[in-house]
Amino acid sequence: MKIYNLSKYFLRFLVLQTTITAITIWYFDNYLIGDYADGFVKIKDNLFEDRNRFYPFVTNDFIKIDIYLAFFVFIFLIILYLSKYYSYVNDLSFTVNKNILDDYIPIYLIWTASFLSFLQLFRFDEVSRFHTIVLTFIVPFILVIFRNSEFVSSILGRNPTKENFICFNLKTDSVFRELRILTFRNELANFTSEIEDFSFYKNTIEGFNKENEINILVFDFSDLEFIPDDFIKYLINLNKKILIISNPQLTFSTNLVFRTKRISNKSIFYLNNDIQYGSNYIAKRLLDIFCLIFFSIIYLPIAIVAYFYISISDGRPALIKQTRVGLHGKNFKMYKFRTMKTDSHLERKGLEELNTNTGPLFKIKNDPRIFKGGNFLRKYSIDEIPQLLNVLKGEMSVVGPRPLFPEDNKHYDENYIRRLNVMPGITGLLQINERNTGDFKIWFKYDLEYIENWNLFLDLKIILLTPISIFKSKASGI
């Protein structure tokens, strides 16, 4: 674990060194000196003079402004890392202030003092004073972004401070409620039970998750010395963040990747099995934004034609919103082009006997609710184009399990509910393999495969194969 943490710190240092050096050199060339050519000459003359006086062993090849700037950034980052102001945001700390200025100001002061000292020490006398001041604000902002993935996640659409948690046996005056991971989140409920009643925990989580968005589970297992393997596996499969508090040092027979800390004579164990969180979420979201821009250019003309066709042939509204279940059980409004008669979803109960699908899926052969041309829109997934708006809002991803209706939650058990723990998508493994199946077990098989093997390369593969699967399809889409 120490090697893993050190490798993360080294990688972050390398990324910061590269990024800040590139920005500083670019800004120096274009703004600090800009078109003032004599400024470069005077600064280089100063550098050669200092070399001759203080370090003549350095060859002329190294007396370059860019090398000096890169070396300065390197020294600055070492100073910053040695300070207490630039470490990873620690969810297990007792941070009580979430104001971004508390992160920004100390870093700003260190950067500004270091940069101005560098300019003075190496006689960079010809730089623009105004642009120097601007640069003192830019770099600390970049450093704050790199320090706190939560900040970037918030910008991209997933604000960690809006996450929800539920507790089991956690006292209202417990000091652990002041941990950052809980202080900045919303508590939905606190349940009390016998400490070894693991069936109660499972049933409560399963039932509560069907009605609410849950991101974090907190268990106070004080005086408990052992947790059964099947319950540990259950927690892992939830794909959520788990916080366990215990008096003794718990031992796990199952291999786990977790963080542990000793606070107030108690041990806390933190399992973050939310696979699309932090840097993973940021990477996936950036891919979504890139695809959103690319697909919007391609599909906008098709969407305009579809909108007017529906409006003319069957009236308005052509675009509808349906309540669906999203990430961790959060409901959202999903956009679709209407392919059925107005309010046809309300007729679903009266047509349930004609349903040919299993589980929560509802599909009727030759569905009488579909207006003329609706099957064509479904076959080629034209009706799904408006869901790019949901991707823009951060409610959906381009790739992920298809979102279902809230009333379909009754079909979920502790296994099926796992499909809620990744962002729902427009396309997925199901769509490139068995797009028109009506068997929910097959849906779940592909959803589970996606959850357990998720990475950006898998998303790219699905995106590239989706058009092929659409044009190969012979039946109307789901």
Image (cartoon, grey):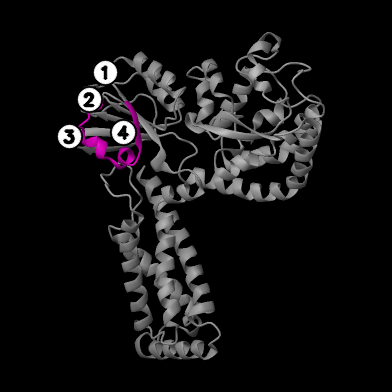
- Residue 135, placed above or below residue 408: below
Q: Tell me which amino acid carries mark 4.
A: Phe
Q: Residue furthest top?
A: 353
Q: Which residues are magenta?
A: 170-189
Check residue 195 in the rendering and tell me which mark sits there, or answer none: 1
- For marks 1 and 3, the one nearer the N-term is 1
The local secondary structure at tag 3 comes to loop
Residues at marks 3 and 4 touching, judged by CB atoms closer than 8 Å:
no
Residue identified by numbered label 4? 269
Residue density around tag 1, few if under 14, some if 14–19, many if 20 or more, within 10 Å? some
User: Residue at 77% of width from left, 25% of height from top?
Assistant: 476
- For marks 1 and 2, the one nearer the N-term is 1
User: Residue at 42% of width from left, 47% of height from top?
Assistant: 150
Image spot of residue 463 (x, y percent): 68, 40
Image spot of residue 115 (x, y percent): 37, 74
Q: Tell me which amino acid carries mark 3.
A: Asn
Distance of label 1 from label 3 (alpha carbons) = 19 Å
The local secondary structure at tag 4 comes to strand
Q: Tell me which amino acid carries mark 2.
A: Ser
Residue identified by numbered label 2? 222
Res 307 → quadrant: top right
Report the front residue among 309 and 443.
Answer: 309
Q: Residue furthest left?
A: 265
Residue density around tag 2, few if under 14, some if 14–19, many if 20 or more, within 10 Å? some
